[in-house]
């Protein structure tokens, strides 16, 4: 048979083994993201002294009182009462997560245009969500609410102003969506561990690998079939995680096009991690040693990718490691798609080139390691 024919035959065998244990594989794939979402999904509500900047165009007693009320909140910390360009620069430079622009008509009257604009940052999504909730709480005493939805204690006739939400970077989103983006990448990377690499360990212990090596098939087809089967299982795990995230309240701002981008990113990353696990499995015959090596490599990469919080919040001494981490770029790509609703060409080119380079290097290492050791 040809190289491609041998690869396809062996790939079908791998997938038959996978589907024969489908229930176990599904449970394993959904438990981890489900636990993380339940534990961390609402973590964005615990911040205090979140920095905000204020622009006061009204310059009236009501506006002064409103600013004092904001400052009195333990959740918020006003770092600047400045012109609008300065306040927006604070948000853009991550010095503040929110710019509260009090317009001349504040507090306004029922049916009037919005009297307050809120510019917020999605690069600090957890703090932004907390700050938005705190401002809404203060606004309720002025008969106003975010997006024009009055608090339950305020009747529509009492509304004096509404807020206009204006994202400075990205579309309206939540920490849950931010978290799901990291979980998808995490599950995809870990899903590869139970694919091609573990299959090599199992085949070696059962004697199947020796049988493959003495049969007249292309030996490179063994490696490629393991990588492809691991990639398939990794994608399967990643999309189970995405499905759980969507049910939990996350969103994909780019819609169907965004799902296609996520498929591409997860596919490319999965190829790299599947190849990496094949290389690791080629050097060891014991499943416990394989698991230790795989997790020792994968876990630090995941934590350094900004899965829980933006990489900008990492300590300065460890931040450079996130810059050379392929998971960082994969997570950034998925989050642009899910949160910002747009995937700029420059960002896509950088993210995909890093992930593709990682995958190619890992595939080359997998083929060479398998040939030398097995």
Image (spheres, grey):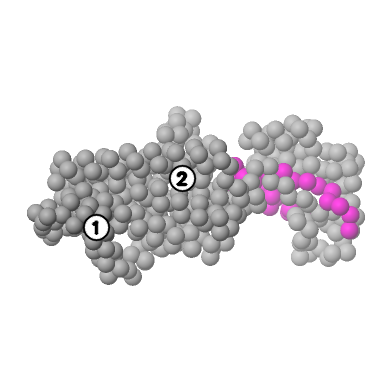
Residue sitting farthest toward the left: 214
Q: At 35% across and 63% down in the image, what residue appears?
A: 28
Residue stretch rendered in magenta on the structure: 111-139
Q: Which sits in the foreground, 361 or 292?
A: 361
- Does 117 appear in magenta? yes
**Comes first in the chain, label 1 or label 2:** 1
Mark 2 = which residue? 330
Q: In 3D space, how far apart are the residues under numbered discs 1 and 2 (Cα atoms)?
A: 32 Å
Residue in the picture at 35% in, 45% down? 272
Q: Image point 53% across, 65% down: which residue?
A: 247
- Closer to the observer: label 1 or label 2? 1
Mark on residue 5?
1
282 on left or right of 257: left
- Residue 322, horizontal then vertical, whole percent: 44, 36
Kindly tell me whether residue 76 is visible in this rendering.
no
Q: Secondary structure at mark 1?
A: helix
Q: Nearer the viewer, residue 8 or 84?
A: 8
Q: Quadrant of residue 257?
A: bottom right
Q: Is residue 373 left or right of residue 65?
A: left
Residue 320 visible in the picture: yes
Q: Is residue 73 above or below residue 317?
A: below
């Amino acid at each position: 048979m040809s190289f491609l024919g041998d690869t396809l035959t062996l790939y079908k065998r791998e997938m038959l083994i996978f589907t024969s244990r489908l229930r176990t594989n599904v449970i394993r794939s959904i438990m981890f993201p489900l636990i993380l979402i339940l534990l961390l999904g609402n973590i964005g509500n615990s911040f205090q002294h979140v920095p905000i900047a204020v622009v006061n165009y009204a310059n009236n007693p009501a506006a002064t009182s409103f600013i004092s009320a904001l400052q009195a909140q333990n959740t918020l910390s006003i770092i600047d009462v400045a012109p609008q360009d300065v306040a927006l620069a604070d948000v853009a430079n991550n010095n503040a997560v929110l710019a509260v622009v009090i317009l001349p008509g504040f507090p306004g009257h029922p049916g009037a245009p919005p009297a307050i604009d809120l510019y917020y940052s999605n690069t600090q999504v957890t703090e932004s969500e907390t700050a938005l909730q705190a401002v809404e709480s203060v606004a309720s005493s002025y008969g106003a609410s975010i997006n024009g939805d009055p608090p339950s204690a305020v009747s529509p006739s009492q509304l004096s102003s509404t807020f206009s939400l204006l994202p400075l970077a990205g579309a309206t989103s939540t920490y849950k969506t931010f978290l799901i983006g990291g979980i998808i990448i995490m599950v995809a990377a870990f899903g590869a561990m139970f694919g091609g690499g573990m299959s090599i360990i199992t085949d070696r212990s059962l004697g199947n690998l020796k049988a493959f090596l003495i049969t007249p098939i292309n030996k490179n087809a063994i490696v490629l079939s393991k990588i492809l089967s691991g990639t398939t299982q990794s994608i399967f795990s990643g999309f189970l995680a995405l499905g759980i995230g969507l049910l939990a309240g996350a969103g994909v701002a780019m819609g169907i096009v965004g799902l296609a981008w996520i498929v591409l990113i997860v596919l490319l990353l999965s190829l790299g991690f599947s190849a990496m696990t094949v290389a690791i499995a080629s050097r060891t015959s014991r499943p416990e040693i394989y698991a230790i090596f795989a997790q020792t490599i994968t876990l630090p990469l995941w934590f350094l990718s900004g899965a829980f919080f933006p990489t900008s919040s990492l300590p300065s001494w460890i931040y450079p490691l996130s810059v050379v981490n392929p998971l960082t770029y994969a997570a950034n790509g998925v989050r642009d798609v899910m949160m910002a609703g747009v995937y700029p060409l420059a960002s896509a080119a950088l993210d995909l080139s890093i992930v593709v380079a990682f995958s190619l290097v890992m595939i080359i290492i997998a083929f060479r390691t398998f040939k030398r050791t097995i």
